[in-house]
Image (cartoon, rainbow, N blue to C red):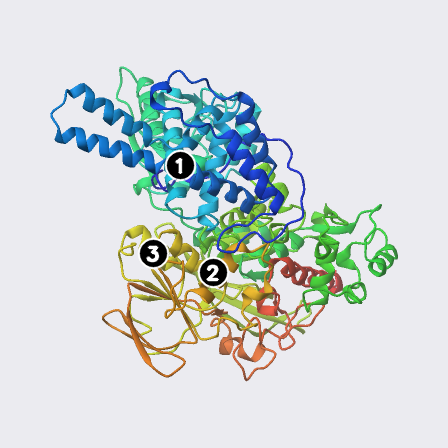
Amino acid sequence: MRGLGPGLAVRRLLPLRLPPRPQRPPGPRLSSRPTVSGALDRAMDELLRRAVPATPVYELREKSPAPAEGQCADFVSFYGGLTEVAERAELLGRLAQGFGVDHGQVAEQSAGVLQLREQPREAAVLLQAEDRLRYALVPRYRGLFHHISKLDGGVRFLVQLRADLIEAQALKLVEGPHVREMNGVLKGMLTEWFSSGFLNLERVTWHSPCEVLQKISESEAVHPVKNWMDIKQRVGPYRRCYFFSHCSTPEEPLVVLHVALTSDISSNIQSIVKECPPAETEEKNKIAAAIFYSISLTQQGLQGVELGTFLIKRVVKELQQGYTGRPGPNFHDARKGQLPAPSPPSAAAMSNWRKDHLGASSSEPLKVIIIGNGPSGICLSYLLSGYTPYVKPDAVHPHPLLQRKLSEAPGVSILDQDLDYLSEGLEGRCQSPVALLFDALLRPDTDFGGNTESVLTWKLQKERAIPHVVLGRNLPGGAWHSIEGSMVTLSQGQWMGLPDLEVKDWMRRKRRGLRNSRATAGDIAHYYRDYVNKKGLGQSFVSGAVVTAVEWGIPEPSGSGAQDPSPLFQVSGFLTAEDQSQQPFSLCAHNVVLATGTSDSPARLGIPGETLPFVHHELSALEVAIRAGTVTPDSDPVLIIGAGLSAADAVLYARHYNILVIHAFRRPVDDPGLVFNQLPKMLYPEYHKVHQMMREQSILSPSPYEGYRSLPEHQLLLFKEDRQALFQDPQGLHKVFGLSLVLVLIGSHPDLSFLPGAGAHLAVDPDQPLSAKRNPIDVEPFTYQSTQQEGLYAVGPLAGDNFVRFVQGGALAVASSLLRKEARKPP
């Protein structure tokens, strides 16, 4: 995060205690800037006129009475009552625009200073004129912030207000120099209020209050805390945990630092995080090094305020004082590269898993291998781990036909019922009947705007668990960890959740909230990883596993010597070891589930020059270039190709950093098939802002969007080595543009190269390329088993379910099918 140094992750912890916000129907919130209703518009103007104190004349600056406390309290109350991000952004934009510096006064005082410099006068006269100029340069809203800081909880409110301002800037809800200036002024004030003299260094031990331990656990963003034993280890012998709190809010962590006291410099961060200390009692003569392995900021509103460096310096002094009279430990910051990044489990982890969970020889086949650890794989692992869904005894489903069917089998788990029968008659936004069924059970009336709780209750029945292993390239959560963390999800936050842990409840425990009912990609990635830990699924997950081949067709001999008709699958690949080497593995299984998603292989243009080093197919390339300084506001434009949401995300990201953008796409801007036309404006203001830019900022017509150009209906012909792109416009004319970077974001295809024939024969139409939207894997609708290969399943986008909300239905179908297979096996 900016201003905090490597390894610092921002997580909100301190809640903003404001009056409850009244509910109001959402409405359009964004054209070229947020819009509000007439009544709210007038209320905002009246509030600002009344609450923002006028600037006294220079001569009376120290004699004017302070504004009434009620005026500032009114602002705090009104702001807390706004229900939408866009409404708060509108109020902050008006505050920045209309209550800043009086430029007329600045010009007048500047002229006076220049005049005095040209005429010989006493130094005191010139200094007073300069003081008048400085006074004129103070914006009016600074007075409002100053008086709010004197209220009870006022500083905390301003920290949250700046967090909202940063969020609004990221979403392009407020823009311009006045907003950036107000952000800088507020940051400067917070820097003064949170200077080291006002900060208290506090150490956390196992005997600290439970509330503090809980907050430390929730705020840890680098190496998440798994359970109470984990946090006990991190604050126990050979470990230190410190945090800064503000003098106005003692025992409220602002920035948290974890330290490991070791006998040497560890070569692997995992040995610090996972291994238990050598003894219950700490022996100082065994400590030779102190490694700072995690530091987390808990307040987004304090971005750019220097807290991390101060904390590290104070902790170094604290530790050194504990070693007076003997050599102190060497201090190493694990965040700065002395230790390698956390590596995924080694090949030994796979062997240990087989030994621990199979209780048999290494040649015994696994029951199930799940390839992919995204939401589909996580949900299926949850169901295969013995978690069983039942209808609550007193639950009444709002769908009368489904309610009648559910009441026919009381006490029977959903996994054991006829999914075909239960899903009959359901309609919705998905073609899969089982997906509609499971979604209706989890979110009964969500499509009608309701928030009725799930009719399901979950019971852990370990005797029903089916041993399985989940192989993933990334951490649990899959591709969500590769998405830029501040990006906002397309689906509503409540639709991103997995069974028995709603996103909104998880966010509430993390002291954070949703943006317009949507969450950030970073929060969702954290949620999925946390879900695996909280539900105790971690022993089945192996990260860093790359599958290179899946083969089948070898029947397994039964005990009587006859051939079992079900095939065996051979799954081969490699894992990244602790020393970053690749160690091969090969596993046999009775069933394989494909849950890899579709983001593995970006779609390509197929034109000359597409393999040049400045042409990329992932948004992360732009992030890296901006961080490295190779793309700046002074660089040639970045070319973004595509008219979908990935391209829109790239436009938003580039404009956030004031990077020049050329946005090219083949379709006309008024094409009704564009995805923007399918998204409600009230839920997706940022995407409709990009669509508006695409319409209004043509390359041939001027518009208010400086630094952005759109090229509708343009065909890209080739890239040149000198970073130029050749286009053909709708009239057949050629155009050449110089570029700094190219992002080709026109979709992606699933990478099933590990299957025979890349899985083409498994598709609905084997003669066409496999595509999640147009030609998915052909599966049985109530088992999700491939119609072409017994024992091979596909879930998620590979089976045509393209939203997290519906991928869980596929997991339900697979789990039900596998449980029925187990029940049919003879004892």
Identity of the residue drawn at 75% across and 64% down: 824
Question: For mark 1, does the 10 Å Cα neighbourhood hold few (<14), some (14 to 19), or many (20 or more) residues?
Answer: some
Residue 690: mark: 2
Secondary structure state at the residue bearing disc 2 = helix
Rendered location of residue 528, percent (x, y): 55, 49
Secondary structure state at the residue bearing disc 1 = loop
Q: CA distance from mark 1 to mark 2?
A: 29 Å
Report the front residue among 353 and 327. 327
Residue type, mark 3 in image: Ile
Q: Is residue 657 left or right of residue 225?
A: left
Please, is residue 94 above or below residue 194 in the view?
below
The image quadrant that residue 633 belongs to is bottom left
Residue 100: mark: 1
Question: For mark 2, does the 10 Å Cα neighbourhood hold few (<14), some (14 to 19), or many (20 or more) residues?
Answer: many
Secondary structure state at the residue bearing disc 3 = loop
Residue 663: mark: none
Report the front residue among 789 and 434. 434
Rendered location of residue 189, percent (x, y): 38, 29
Residue beneath disc 3: 659
Rendered location of residue 662, percent (x, y): 36, 65
- Is residue 798 visible in the rendered structure shown here? yes
The image quadrant that residue 779 belongs to is bottom right
Identity of the residue drawn at 40% across and 33% down: 186
Identity of the residue drawn at 75% across and 66% down: 427
Please say if the residues under marks 3 and 1 sit with CB atoms less than 8 Å apart.
Answer: no
For the C terminus, the quadrant is bottom right
